[in-house]
Image (tube, rainbow, N blue to C red):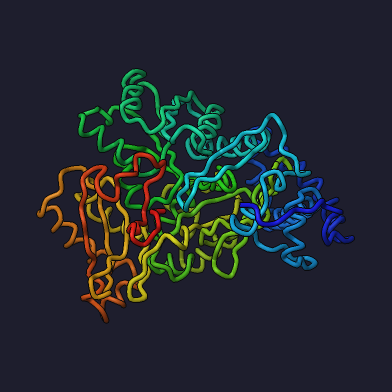
């Protein structure tokens, strides 16, 4: 909803001599980025040769130039800076509330104009409320698609393969763009999340081709489970997986690796764009080390019960910062954006590290990054790392213990029988008649739930949760009767899972209708 009236820009806000000098010096950095986008080999050697310190500096300069250009050319951003009492050298954070909803779509466009062609509209999934519309130029979509293509080549190689794109089709940003991006690498069939079509495609073309199946992590699990139920000969096929749209536990990765040769994830946000960052062999190896060794996890990512997703990103395309709340701030530094995002906060918590800083930190912990499992030291790129815990509002809290969806997923995949039985899950807080509260875990299971199955969940989940979540373990010592979770099982599409068919992502947080809120 529009709340502020944008004014016509009247010059670059705060652009003094140093700013103009930086923008002049930026010219060779723009040429480097263009060169790196000419082919995968150019991309590979650019980020293998350029040192981490240079990439950090160039990314910071590009981000400042993007902010200055937005202040000059975008009516909404110029007004935003005035409303936020802009100070020389400090550009305030933007987010959906203070910037996107505060100005019209046209005001947030360059020169305040929405062009009449070569524009595509994406719709967000609505995972945090009402779906929203995002506009992009043809050029900015091509650039983000190219980033996805290079990432896929780096992770899966140059071998010919068939891609089955199982991301949801339609207005969503991921599905259509992933299909177009991966056409640069392979033959693509856009099936959407249709298990019957996917298995038919595999059967039709046969096991003589390698396949890359792209989709949301839980969907790939459902695909494997259903294939096994139908006695489909997955073992005859060479499959790799490319996932995104939400986080993935290492337990789920192990589950998928029973049938997939490799599984890598990408990071993006509809508010921003797809292809912001991607898992690489070294990023996965570091994350799995942190999964096995809590001391490594704490040293690298801080004192948090969650194991974050770990990616590498291109700092010449995306400048990432971290605010005092450990939230990631993104500036897309390319000039092709119709609606620039400057220090934009999607409220994902996480952190960043230069490649050399991560390497040195691991050395101080007695780990040589070159000898981690699955890492080829000759192919390492100097790209920085970003780790993502997820949204702050995707939690429940009982007696001071924060419980996250990632915790519950780890508990599930620690028990293979429970993992196979579970289709989806979500969390809530259950309130008793006297106002007492306790955590409530709700599971959608593949078979009709019975008391025996319920008892298996009740025995396994609390014990694993105490192992992995420090808050929960400490609170349990003081309030064990309050922390015993209420566990409820539902059949497919029943109870709180009835609306999941109309959603492109599974919901992880459930709040009851009487609270006048919706699942997010």
- Asked whether residue 42 appears in the rendered view, the answer is yes
Q: Residue 391: x percent and y percent? A: 47, 59
Q: Residue at x 34, y 44 (%)?
A: 499
Q: Residue at x 25, y 34 (%)?
A: 226
Residue in front for this viewpoint, 242 or 16: 16
Q: Residue furthest bottom?
A: 478
Residue 202 against residue 428 in the figure, above or below? above
Q: Residue 458: x percent and y percent? A: 18, 61
**20 relative to 270 in the view: left or right:** right
Q: How many marks?
A: 0
Q: Residue at x 48, y 23 (%)?
A: 187
Residue 48 against residue 81 in the figure, above or below? above
Q: Residue at x 52, y 31 (%)?
A: 182
Q: Residue furthest right?
A: 17
Q: Quadrant of residue 12?
A: bottom right
**262 relative to 132 in the view: left or right:** left
Residue in front for this viewpoint, 235 or 316: 316
Residue in front for this viewpoint, 337 or 320: 337
Q: Residue 372: x percent and y percent? A: 44, 53
Residue in front for this viewpoint, 316 or 115: 115
Q: Residue 344: x percent and y percent? A: 62, 56
Q: Quadrant of residue 463?
A: bottom left
Q: Residue furthest left?
A: 452
Residue 434 against residue 462 in the figure, above or below? below
Residue 368 against residue 173 in the figure, above or below? below
**370 relative to 191 in the view: left or right:** right
- Asked whether residue 378 appears in the rendered view, the answer is no
């Amino acid at each position: 909803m529009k709340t502020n009236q944008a004014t016509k820009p009247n010059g670059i806000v705060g652009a003094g001599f140093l700013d103009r000098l930086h923008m002049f010096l930026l010219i060779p950095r723009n040429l480097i980025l263009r060169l790196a986008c000419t082919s995968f080999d150019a991309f590979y050697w650019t980020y293998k040769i350029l040192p981490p310190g240079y990439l950090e500096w160039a990314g910071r300069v590009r981000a400042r130039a993007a902010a200055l250009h937005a202040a000059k050319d975008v009516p909404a951003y110029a007004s935003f800076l005035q409303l936020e009492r802009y100070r020389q050298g400090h550009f305030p954070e933007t987010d959906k509330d203070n910037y996107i909803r505060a100005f019209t779509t046209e005001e947030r466009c360059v020169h305040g104009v929405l062009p009449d062609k070569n524009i595509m509209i994406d719709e967000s999934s609505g995972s945090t409320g009402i779906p929203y519309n995002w506009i992009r130029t043809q050029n900015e979509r091509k650039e983000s698609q190219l980033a996805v293509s290079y990432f896929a080549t780096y992770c899966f190689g140059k071998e010919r393969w068939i891609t089955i794109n199982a991301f949801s089709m339609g207005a969503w940003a991921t599905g259509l763009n992933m299909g177009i991006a991966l056409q640069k690498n392979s033959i693509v069939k856009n099936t959407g999340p249709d298990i019957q079509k996917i298995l038919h495609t595999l059967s039709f073309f046969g096991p003589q081709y390698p396949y890359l199946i792209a989709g949301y992590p839980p969907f790939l699990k459902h695909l494997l489970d259903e294939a096994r139920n139908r006695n489909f000969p997955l073992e005859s096929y060479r499959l790799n997986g490319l996932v995104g749209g939400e986080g993935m536990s290492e337990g789920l990765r192990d589950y998928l690796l029973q049938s997939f040769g490799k599984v890598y994830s990408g990071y993006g946000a509809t508010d921003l764009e797809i292809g912001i960052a991607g898992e690489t062999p070294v990023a996965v190896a570091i994350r799995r080390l942190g999964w096995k060794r809590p001391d490594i996890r704490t040293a690298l990512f801080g004192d948090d019960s969650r194991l974050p997703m770990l990616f590498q990103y291109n700092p010449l395309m995306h400048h990432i910062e971290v605010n005092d709340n450990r939230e990631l701030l993104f500036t897309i530094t390319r000039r092709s954006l119709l609606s620039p995002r400057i220090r934009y906060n999607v409220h994902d918590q996480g952190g960043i590290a230069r490649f050399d800083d991560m390497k040195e930190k691991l050395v101080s912990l007695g780990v040589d990054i070159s000898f981690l499992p699955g890492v080829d030291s000759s192919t390492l790129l100097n790209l920085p790392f970003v780790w993502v815990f997820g949204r702050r509002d995707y939690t429940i809290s009982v007696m001071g213990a924060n419980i996250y969806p990632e915790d519950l997923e780890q508990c599930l995949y620690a028990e293979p029988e429970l993992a196979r039985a579970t289709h989806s899950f979500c969390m809530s807080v259950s309130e008793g008649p006297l106002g007492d509260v306790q955590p409530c875990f709700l599971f959608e299971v593949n078979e009709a739930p019975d008391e025996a199955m319920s008892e298996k969940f009740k025995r396994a989940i609390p014990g694993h949760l105490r192992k992995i979540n420090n808050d929960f373990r400490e609170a349990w010592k003081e309030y064990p009767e309050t922390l015993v979770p209420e566990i409820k099982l539902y059949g497919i599409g029943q109870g709180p899972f009835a609306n999941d068919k109309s959603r492109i992502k599974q919901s992880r947080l459930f709040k009851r209708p009487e609270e006048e809120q919706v699942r997010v």
